[in-house]
Amino acid sequence: MIKRSLKLPELGLLIFMLRGKPGTERLLGLLHRVEVAELKAGETGGLRFTSSQANRRLGERIANTQFLDEDGVMVFASLYLDQEGELYELDYWKTADSALLRIPAF
């Protein structure tokens, strides 16, 4: 699993999804330094937030949104925390089950 920093469109999407949600100020403050690994690189998939914590598990969904990809296909995105309330995963999928072309500016 290759770790990397967030790309600018991913950062914009996450800020959009977290803004205004109760208790997310701390998470917003961490976005500039988180590392992620791509899930199913180049396909519909998403990002897994890396952590030094062992035995992390999927927790609650804290945000979701939808947008049109540049090919006009609807994309659904959901943001999940782990069982400890830390960023865990950003999932996205297209209704045509094709690769995400571009995250729009938010």
Image: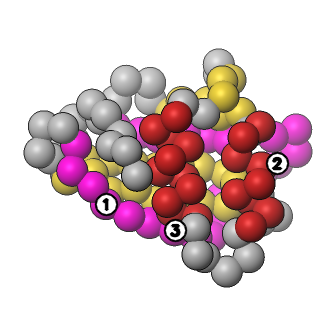
Q: Position of residue 37 (x, y in %)?
A: 61, 30
The crowding category of the residue bearing disc 1, from other C-alpha atoms within 10 Å (few below 14, some 14 to 19, many at least 20), is few
Q: Position of residue 66 (x, y in %)?
A: 31, 60
Callout 2 amino acid: Asn
Q: Earlier in the sequence, mark 3 or mark 2?
A: 2
The label on residue 63 is 3
Give the vertical position of 97 relative to 37 (above or below): below
Find the residue positioned furthest to the top: 2
50 horizontally vs 91: left or right: right
Q: How is the image coloured?
A: secondary structure
Q: SS at mark 2? A: loop
- Residue at 72% x, 40% y is 32
Give the vertical position of 52 relative to 90 (above or below): above
The label on residue 55 is 2
Magenta stretch in the rendered image: 44-69
Find the residue positioned furthest to the bottom: 22
C-alpha span from label 3 to label 2: 23 Å
- Residue at 54% x, 53% y is 14
Mark 1 touches mark 3? (CB < 8 Å): no
Q: SS at mark 1? A: strand
Mark 3 or mark 2: which is in front? 3
Mark 1 or mark 2: which is in front? 1
C-alpha span from label 1 to label 3: 11 Å
Q: SS at mark 3? A: strand
Residue wearing tag 1: 66
Callout 3 amino acid: Ala
Mark 3 touches mark 2? (CB < 8 Å): no
